[in-house]
Image (cartoon, grey):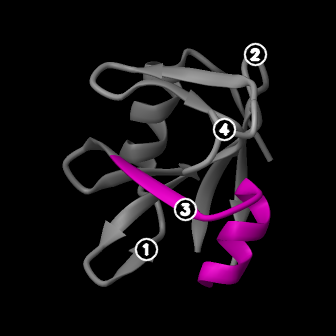
Amino acid sequence: MRVLVREPIKQPLQLKEIEGSLEEIQEIIGGDIEIVPMTKGLLCVYNEDGKMKGLEKNFFHDYAGWILGTVIFVSDGGEEFGSLTDGQITFIKEYIGSQVIQ
């Protein structure tokens, strides 16, 4: 599954291929998941305990406020997460204002 991963603020977006299991995603973000929609069909997955754990700011979401800690951007595949499209990658890159590295 093609995703974008971003560590806290001022880090570039990283284009990665992952299996996408819940355990793998929890390992990347460092805990239980919280999900916030970015736009139709595009989700941001992050650590639900980020504030309590004192994680650093990642980016400011228009409705949710500061998203903390490492995040993963995925496509909304219904019951499962899906791979990002080129258009979704471009949207995230512009929304965050960050380059994408591989």
Q: Measure the C-alpha gap from mark 3 to mark 2.
A: 22 Å
Residue at figure coordinates x 48%, y 43% from the top left: 89
Q: Element under label 3?
A: strand
Name the residue carrying label 4: 52
Q: Element under label 2?
A: loop
Amino acid on which the number 2 mark rests in the picture:
Lys
Name the residue carrying label 2: 10
Name the residue carrying label 1: 81
The range drawn in magenta is 19-36
Residue 33 image-quadrant placement:
bottom right
Residue 38 image-quadrant placement:
top left
Amino acid on which the number 1 mark rests in the picture:
Phe
Q: Give the left or right position of residue 35, taking residue 76 as reference.
A: right
Indicate the position of residue 56 as horizontal and vertical percent values: 75, 25
First in sequence: mark 3 or mark 1?
A: 3
Q: Residue 8 shows which numbered tag? A: none
Q: Measure the C-alpha gap from mark 1 to mark 4.
A: 26 Å
First in sequence: mark 3 or mark 2?
A: 2
Residue 59 belongs to magenta span: no
Mark 1 nearby-residue class (10 Å; few <14, some 14–19, many ≥20): many
